[in-house]
Image (cartoon, rainbow, N blue to C red):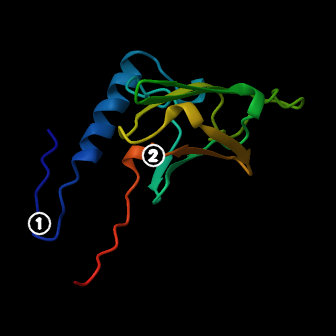
Amino acid sequence: MNITRWRRNDVYDPMRDLERIQNEINKLFDIEPSDGVSGLFDTSFSPAVDIVEHEDRYEVECDLPGVSKDDIELAVAGNVLTIKGEKKGEKKRENGGYFRKETWSGSFQRSLALPQSADGEKIDATLRDGVLRISLPKREEMKPKRISVSVA
């Protein structure tokens, strides 16, 4: 029986316990990290996204390194922006397999709820240096209006 004693300096890390449980489940189902997944509870790839609000538009930046513009599909339905795509996997090395592979390949999808003020009809997108930039102008009626005040 293994008994762990806590000292005042020890900090409990629940992620360590979850990782241990995941490793035990992986052993139970014979899942090896070399299979391309690190565990039963891995999710499919979801690209990182930043949304910046400007006075006249919203700008979405999505990190998609190694993805071709021909492999990206954008759709707007209501106030939901969907980014779909696929990163083609590299061919295996001629001299053997990977010693370590941390890059991803395969299909991905990301859906984002947009503010009501975004105009999905006038969407503009560019892909440069692995970053997809999507510009969504604000609807005219939703843009802030400046009203001058006169002194009487």
Q: Nearer the viewer, residue 86 or 89?
A: 86
Asked if residue 72 lies left or right of residue 76, the reply is right
Mark carried by residue 116: none
Asked if residue 26 lies left or right of residue 48, the reply is left
Q: Nearer the viewer, residue 20 or 81?
A: 81
- First in residue order: circle 2 vs circle 1: 1
Instruction: Give the residue at mark 2.
Output: 140
Residue 36 image point, x, y percent: 58, 27
Asked if residue 45 lies left or right of residue 103, the reply is left
Looking at the picture, does residue 11 appear above or below residue 111? below
Q: Nearer the viewer, residue 116 or 71?
A: 116
Asked if residue 31 lies left or right of residue 104, the reply is left
Which element is circle 1 on? loop
Quadrant of the drawing holding the C terminus: bottom left
Q: Are marks 2 and 1 in contact (CB under 8 Å)?
A: no
Q: Report the mark closest to the observer, 2 or 1.
A: 2
Query: Residue shown at 28%/46% (left/top)?
Result: 15
Residue 75 image point, x, y percent: 56, 24
Q: Quadrant of residue 90?
A: top right
- For label 1, the crowd category at 10 Å Cα-Cα, with few meaning under 14, some 14 to 19 and many 20 or more, is few
Tell which residue pokes out farthest to the right in this image: 94
Residue 35 image point, x, y percent: 58, 23
Instruction: Give the residue at mark 1.
Output: 7
- Asked whether residue 55 is in view, the answer is yes
Query: Residue shown at 36%/18% (left/top)?
Result: 28
